[in-house]
Image (cartoon, rainbow, N blue to C red):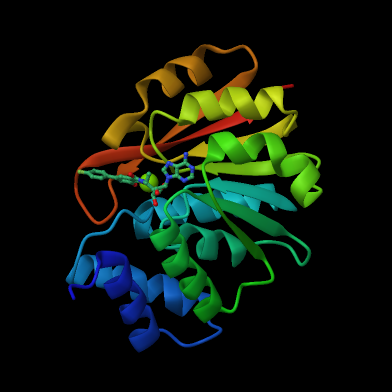
């Protein structure tokens, strides 16, 4: 039977990356996506911006919406402080199964908690289920029309504190117009746009970094 793109991406990781070496996993995925098949990971160019934000925030608690194959979860987890953890939500069980194996190959199972389900269902349960008070950093990379409702939901559920950072992928391509309009005009956020390109292409895209002011 025909393999899927995530399955081929995992095979490339298992062939070309060193077990327990997260940076070799990131490199193997980027090489696969540049040389073999495009895939919707945040990628190497936007990934450098992600790295600089993670390093600056030095987060103890990270929430990622939209795991896909685990590329950005691995990239973020590499940079966390010793007791830092990332909870990553993935709706599609097939993608989650691949991501689990990519995370295992990187040796980051202790730092990354992968949860299968929809963000809208899980966000209200995170505090009680995972003993999280608030998140220092949230990386939004799921369905582009869920960024705004889920941001409002995180506010309502008390998952954000003064200084929490939201970093949103794809605000230009595919685009998240309602989220951008809200976050750039809300007095409760201070936003900054980091111009870049859609992963592995020359098409414009970028990341929007927003600080929650409380
Ligand atoms: C949405 C996907 C990423 C993953 O998110 C999971 N997901 C969804 N909704 C939920 C939820 N509500 N809760 C939890 N997980 C959830 C899903 O199952 C995918 O695995 N990402 C994209 O579609 C995406 C697309 C492009 C793109 C750009 C130009 C093109 F011509 C074509 C595609 C680029 C990107 O950088 C992306 O990130
Ligand atoms: Mg994305």
Given residues 148 and 52, the one toward you in this image is 148
Quadrant for residue 7, please give it. Answer: bottom left
Figure quadrant of the N terminus:
bottom left
Given residues 83 and 98, the one toward you in this image is 98
Q: Is residue 91 visible?
A: yes
Given residues 108 and 6, the one toward you in this image is 6
Residue 100 versus residue 182 in the image, above or below: below
How many circles with numbers are drawn on the protein?
A: 0
Q: Position of residue 198 (x, y in %)?
A: 27, 46
Q: Residue at x 70, y 53 (%)?
A: 58
Figure quadrant of the C terminus:
top right
Residue 79 versus residue 40 in the image, above or below: below
Q: Is residue 166 visible?
A: no
Q: Residue at x 51, y 12 (%)?
A: 185
Given residues 207 and 33, the one toward you in this image is 33
Q: Position of residue 108 (x, y in %)?
A: 61, 73
Left or right, 18 with reference to 5? right
Q: Residue at x 43, y 70 (%)?
A: 26
């Amino acid at each position: 039977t025909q393999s899927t793109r995530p399955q081929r991406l995992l095979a490339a990781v298992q062939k070309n990356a060193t077990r327990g070496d997260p940076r070799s996993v990131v490199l193997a995925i980027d090489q696969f996506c540049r040389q073999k098949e495009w895939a919707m990971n945040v990628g190497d160019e936007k990934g450098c911006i992600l790295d600089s934000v993670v390093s600056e925030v030095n987060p103890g608690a990270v929430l990622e919406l939209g795991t896909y194959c685990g590329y950005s979860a691995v990239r973020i987890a590499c940079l966390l402080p010793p007791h830092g953890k990332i909870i990553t939500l993935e709706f599609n069980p097939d993608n989650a199964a691949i991501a689990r194996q990519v995370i295992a190959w990187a040796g980051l199972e202790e730092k990354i908690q992968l949860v299968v389900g929809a963000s809208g269902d899980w966000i209200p349960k995170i505090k009680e289920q995972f003993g999280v008070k608030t998140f220092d950093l949230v990386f939004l990379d799921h369905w582009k029309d869920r960024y705004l409702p889920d941001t409002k939901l995180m506010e309502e559920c008390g998952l954000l504190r003064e200084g929490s950072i939201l970093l949103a992928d794809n605000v230009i391509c595919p685009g998240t117009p309602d989220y951008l309009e809200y976050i750039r005009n809300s007095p409760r956020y201070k936003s900054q746009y980091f111009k870049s390109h859609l992963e592995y292409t020359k098409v414009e895209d970028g990341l929007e970094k927003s600080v929650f002011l409380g």
